[in-house]
Amino acid sequence: MDKEVRMKFRNRMKKAAKFLPMETCFKMSPHKMILPYYHTVTDSPKPHYSNLGYFRDKNDFIRDLDFFQNNFQSVGIENLDFSRKTFHLSFDDGLAENYSIVAQLLYEQKVHATFFVNSNFIDNKEMFIRHKVSLIMSEAKKSPSCRTLLSGYLKTEEKNIDSVLLMENNENTVNKLGSLLLLNFEDYLKAQKPYLTTHNLKEMAKMGFTIGNHSTRHFRFSSLKFAEQKKDIFEANSFLKELNIEYLYFCFPYGDDLVPNELFDWMYLEADILKSFGTSGLKRDGHKNHYHRILMEDQKWKAEEIIKFEYLYYFMKRFFNKNKTRR
């Protein structure tokens, strides 16, 4: 099933699932707990992430919270329990709005959350490659001459530039593309300060939120050697420990596909990781301390529709023995 057909199928399922009562959903799965996750919340998407689609506008987010609180109980990350109707929110990548907007909203509503941060981006020391790509896309939209330059460099038609850029994973290539358009990523970091600061993290911890490990620079872990995976987790752990964060939790950048079992064993036994997280939706995992989360940033759908779809999809996967991750 190709991507377009799969997307149409999922959208039809979401339309059907929204009519299901929540009590019916709970009967479809032993999962009573849900783990929704986001990247940030804003009414004014910034160019370093606006082209990636990973954000929720403020009103939609508040409606999401209403749905969660009406159907589930908010719990801390230390109290995750599949058998109870609970939810725990998390936010990835350490964007600045997670302090200025998200933390304030959640604190007012007494909703628990974990913010998974990349240690090398904190204090705006470095910039995430995907955010550089979004900046390049924003610049190209403003200028036909920029699109012509990119088309020539990438050896693709102008209509394909965005899709090619979104597939680019080579940092050197992205940096060259930025230079081609006279973009200075270091100047952008200094002027716009897109990421959380150490001070922000300390304040968020005081507010009762959990700060978690999302790696140092958001590498795709399946592309790293075992020794590199361990080194990255250890370095990000060290950063958190310097902030006096005692309990360590890890969230895989880009998900946990093709990550070997030996890394999970090492994390729990030697790296002081209490729980780890993936991105496979409503799904059980073979590792009892590894949990999967549900992405909530599809702008076309409400939280109710996304969550009910996950329950219906889980129910269908059971017939094909696809409701549990196996490695």
Image (spheres, rainbow, N blue to C red):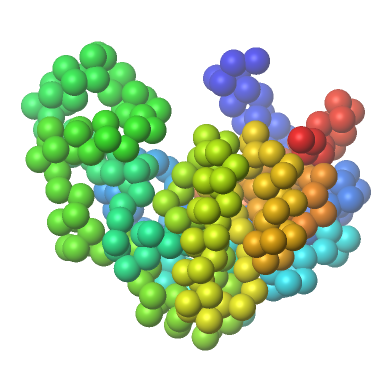
Relative image position of residue 36 (x, y in whole percent): 63, 55
> Measured from the top left, where is residue 56 in percent x and y?
46, 54
Image point (82%, 54%), residue name: 288
Seen at 65% across and 39% down, the residue is: 259
> Residue farthest to the bottom?
206
Q: Is residue 60 visible?
A: no
Instruction: Quadrant for residue 136, please give it.
Output: top left
Name the residue rendered at 24%, 20% in the picture: 154
Q: Is residue 138 left or right of residue 11?
A: left
| 292 relative to 114, above or below | above
Q: Which quadrant: the N terminus?
A: top right
Residue 18 versus residue 156 in the image, above or below: below
| 314 left or right of 255 in image | right
- In the rendered image, residue 3, in percent from the top left (x then y), is placed at 56, 21
How many numbered marks, from 0 up? 0
For image coordinates 32% across by 37% down, the residue present is 171
Q: Nearer the viewer, residue 247 or 314?
A: 247
Residue 311's image quarter?
A: top right
Nearer the observer, 116 or 160: 116
Q: Residue furthest front?
A: 227
Can residue 186 be seen in the rendering of this structure? yes
Query: Residue 30, relative to residue 97: is it above or below?
Result: above
Q: State the quadrant of the C terminus.
A: top right
Percent across and percent down for residue 262 are: 72, 44
